[in-house]
Image: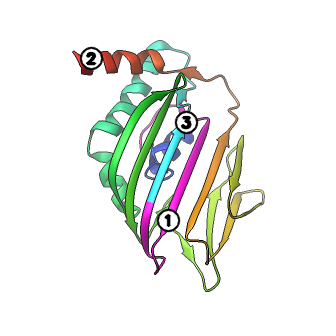
Amino acid sequence: MKSVKRIFTLISLAVLTGITGCLTFQKMRVEIHFEDNYRQGEIKVTYTGIGTSESDKDRQMSDFEDLREAVEENNFYLDALEDGIYVKEIQLKKADDQIVGEYTGIFRNLRIEGKQFQVNENDCTLEIAKEEGYKIRSNGEVTEDADKFTIVWPKSERSIWYEITCSPDQPVYSLLPYFDSWQEGKNE
């Protein structure tokens, strides 16, 4: 499933997904604040309702381990650097009986999904590949065609955000039991 790569490349934006497996999310929110030159700034990415499309318990455990490793090991930090992001903090937590993944960082020459964030004379533009079941909201103007969503913000707007809501085309299974076991093990 493509959403796993999106969870940590987008948590590397796209942000908690440079891993393999069948991880999904209900909502991803990206908040970006640009400095004066639009080349650098701060970013925060939050994934809410992280789960898996795997019904097999062993594969669910494997997906959770991939997620845990992305948070605890250096690979995610290195992948984010390729997109111009220095990750300051990354965490996996439980909120409202859901797994939430979040990271914050600073950036220079931001890339999203491997593409340079476009800053033009009068506006800023972001193109996001269209995937089945995705809906996008933003404080910018959102348009879509058969292959992509395009978001345009006026250049005067220094704090921008967008949210992707995912309606999966298959059942989603909770990873909370694995998360709870992981947390218990950390507290022992």
Query: Does the magenta segment cover residue 29?
Result: yes
Image x and y of residue 130, in percent = 68, 52
Residue drawn at x 68%, y 60% is 139
What residue is pinned by disc 1? 33
Task: Give the spatial CA distance, label 3 vs label 2.
Answer: 23 Å
Q: Please rate how many residues cluster around mark 1, counting C-alpha atoms within 10 Å: few if below 14, some from 14 to 19, many from 20.
A: some
- Left or right of residue 84: residue 159: right
Q: Nearer the viewer, residue 75 or 100?
A: 100
When asked about the image quadrant of residue 168, the answer is top right
Secondary element type, mark 1: strand
Task: Give the spatial CA distance, label 3 vs label 1.
Answer: 21 Å
On residue 185, the disc is 2
Q: Looking at the image, is mark 3 or mark 1 earlier in the sequence?
A: 1
Secondary element type, mark 3: strand
Q: Which of 148 and 166 is in front in this view?
A: 166
* Quadrant of the snapshot with the N terminus: top right
Image x and y of residue 186, in percent = 25, 21
- Between label 3 and label 1, give the one nearer the viewer: 1
- Left or right of residue 49: residue 68: left
Three-letter code for the amino acid on which mark 2 is drawn: Gly
Image x and y of residue 42, in percent = 43, 62
Q: Give the range drawn in magenta.
A: 18-42
Answer above or below: position of 128 versus 74: below
Q: Looking at the image, is mark 3 or mark 2 earlier in the sequence?
A: 3
What residue is pinned by disc 3? 48
Three-letter code for the amino acid on which mark 1 is drawn: His
On residue 132, the disc is none
Of all residues shown, which one is farthest toward the bottom? 121
Answer above or below: position of 176 versus 79: above
Q: Looking at the image, is mark 2 or mark 1 earlier in the sequence?
A: 1
- Left or right of residue 105: residue 33: right
